[in-house]
Amino acid sequence: MADTALRPLNIICLATYFKGVDFIRECKAHGCNVVLITKEKMLNEDWPRESLDDLYAVPNDAGPPLFIDLVAFLSKRMKVDRVIALEEFDVVTAALIREHLCMPGLSASDAKVFRDKLLMAVRSQKGGITVPDFVPLINPDDISHYMETVPAPWVIKPRSDVSAIGIKKVDQPDQVWQTIEE
């Protein structure tokens, strides 16, 4: 840690979508060296190139292993101080990179909480945060009991999609079963 007091922080930003421009600019304004890793399809977006020390694009179908390999390669040229996901899709990848480099920060297991709606609801509830009544769409008996005790309408959320993608509001039990089947 002592060496960061003598030099700017080196921050790797992951953005598989065009987001985080203000964050990049703010990091640069604070004297940080900022490297952006994005997907090829995002390369021509209006990134604040004046605030970037480097910009890399991985293939559009790249998974976490390629991101990990690229950051491991970059870490041979510079000490990586932070790995930041600028987009929700990249939270787990950033955590995997940090784990690979033995860096502090959110672990992949903890990062998955932000990508799994059921896990987020369970953890929130266990942490004392008030959440609406819910039931995992796993056991038919539990689902039936939920529909008998919680009045419609019911909101069915896919576990892994982001934002409101795939969310469906239903009023009838047969709609629930049909949606689960789909």
Image (cartoon, rainbow, N blue to C red):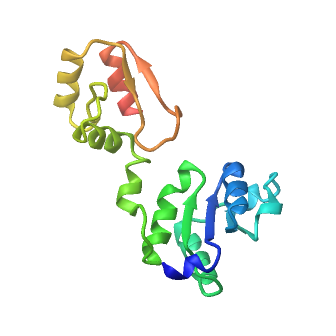
Q: Residue 143 vs residue 82: left or right?
A: left
Which residue occupies the foreground of this view, 179 or 28?
28
Please count the marks in the image.
Answer: 0
Where does the C terminus fall, quadrant-wise? top left
Task: Give the image quarter of residue 175.
Answer: top left
Residue at horizontal 31%, vertical 29%? 131
Q: Residue 74 vs residue 48: left or right?
A: left
- Say whether residue 151 is visible: yes
Q: Residue 45 vs residue 125: left or right?
A: right
Residue 89, image x, y percentages = 54, 51
Name the residue furthest bottom: 76
Task: Give the image quarter of residue 150.
Answer: top left
Q: Can you say whether 118 is above or below 130 in the image?
A: below
Residue 14, image x, y percentages = 62, 61
- Say whether residue 59 is visible: no
Q: Can you say whether 168 is above or below 71 in the image?
A: above
Residue at horizontal 24%, vertical 36%? 128
Residue at horizontal 47%, vertical 59%? 92
Q: Residue 54 vs residue 99: left or right?
A: right
Residue 75, image x, y percentages = 59, 82
Residue 28, image x, y percentages = 72, 62
Residue at horizontal 44%, vertical 48%? 115
Which residue occupies the foreground of this view, 33 or 46?
33
Which residue occupies the foreground of this view, 43 or 175?
43
